[in-house]
Amino acid sequence: MDPHAPCPCGSALPYARCCGRWHAGAEHLQAPTAEALMRSRYSAYVLGLPDYLAATWHPSRRPDPIPLPGRCPVRC
């Protein structure tokens, strides 16, 4: 995704300054608030980042496979 494009979470910030920093880089997996975490998880879902979703989902509640847009979560 273009780091200067609007973040999919709906904030007014560009992706790189919003959820992109939690998805990769020095601040990977370090969303500082519950809101930032949920926004980053939504963006990861929209962008098709299953590894980020898995890393932020408690193992006891995580589906396998992780459902993403355009993918069937079960046999189709």
Image (cartoon, rainbow, N blue to C red):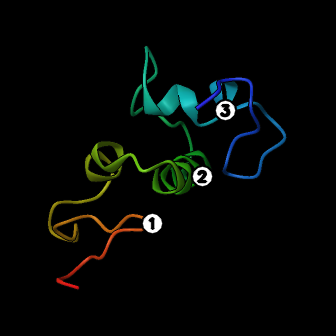
Say which quarter of the image contains residue 3.
top right
| Residue 63 x, y percent position in the rendering | 21, 71
Circle 3/circle 2 CB separation < 8 Å:
no
Q: CA distance from mark 3 to mark 2?
A: 11 Å
| Residue 27 x, y percent position in the rendering | 46, 21
**Dot in front, 2 or 1:** 1
Q: Would you place residue 72 above or below residue 46 in this image?
A: below
Say which residue appears at 22% left-offset and 66% top-offset: 62
Residue 29 vs residue 34: left or right? left
Question: Badge 1: how crowded within 10 Å, few (<14), some, or many (20+)?
Answer: few
Tag of residue 69:
1
Residue type pointed to by label 1:
Pro
Q: CA distance from mark 3 to mark 1?
A: 19 Å
Q: CA distance from mark 2 to mark 1?
A: 16 Å
Residue type pointed to by label 2:
Arg
Badge 1 element:
loop
Q: Residue furthest bottom?
A: 76
Residue 31 vs residue 75: left or right? right
Badge 2 element:
helix
Say which quarter of the image contains residue 36.
top right
| Residue 17 x, y percent position in the rendering | 68, 25
On the image, numbered disc 2 is attached to which residue?
Answer: 39
Q: Would you place residue 39 above or below residue 51 in this image?
A: below
Say which quarter of the image contains residue 72.
bottom left
